[in-house]
Structures are given as structure tokens and as C-alpha cells.
Amino acid sequence: MPRACEADGPHAPHSAGCTTPPAPEPPRTRRPADPRIKSAGRSRPQRWCDAVVELLALQAEYAKWLAALPDSLSDSPTAEALGAIVDLDLTELADIEPPRGYGRD
């Protein structure tokens, strides 16, 4: 009767007895991003534009949340925080065009 650990082929155990199976390979992980590179290839003006667009989108989401709050929560700290965010004038940020730098302005 053959033993369960016997194998044929190139991966057969070298000794006549049973061998333990090889240890599994550690999972391959991606190299961590270089912490010195924050822009991921985008220029500062592009990052500024992306940040402003994200802030405007978040402000719109918070405005919807504030509008959907029930009347019982209208005086709550949540409503006050949402109101403060909605009341911010972010259009000034959108109007700013940051310098491109190094004589490219």
C-alpha cells in the first residue's frame, strides 16, 4: 500500500521516508510607496485643483445631509457642524490659480 506522502516526478522526496511539505511562499506584497513622493506624478497646480474639486463635492454632500436631517436634530452638534461646513465660501478657493513656478507663469 503506497504512503500518502510518496510522490513521483521532479518534486519527489529525496529520502525513502515521508517528508514534510515545503513551506508556502510568503504572499507577495507591493513595495510601499516612497513617502517622499506625495504628488504621484501630478503637479502642484493639478493637486490644488483636485483638492478644491474634492472639497466642493464634499460640501455638496454635507449640504444634502443637512437638508435631510430630521427636525429633532436641527439643534444638535451634528447640525451645527454640517451648517458650518455648508456656510464656508469655497468659491474663493476655486478662483485661485496657483503659480506654476520657475518662470512658467
Image (spheres, grey):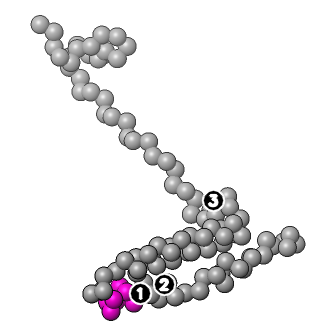
Q: Is residue 80 magenta?
A: yes
Question: How many residues crowd around disc 3 within 10 Å: few (fewer than 14), some, or many (20 or more)?
Answer: few
Residue beneath label 1, please? Answer: 81
| Magenta span | 74-81
Q: Nearer the viewer, mark 3 or mark 1?
A: 1
**Residue that numbered label 2 is attached to:** 85
- Image position, residue 7 (x, y; %): 27, 13
Residue type at the position of mark 2? Ile
The residue located at (54%, 71%) in the rendering is 57
Asked whether the residues under the numbered discs 3 and 1 touch, taking CB atoms below 8 Å apart as contact, a structural biologist would say no
| Left or right: 46 as drawn, with respect to 54 | right
Instruction: Say if 53 sits above or below 34 in the image.
Output: below
3D distance between C-alphas at marks 1 and 2: 6 Å
The quadrant of the rendering that contains the N terminus is top left
Residue that appears at 52% across and 50% down: 31
Q: Name the residue rendered at 55%, 87% in the picture.
A: 88
Q: Nearer the viewer, residue 74 or 1?
A: 74
> Relative to 68, does residue 34 appear above or below in the rendering?
above
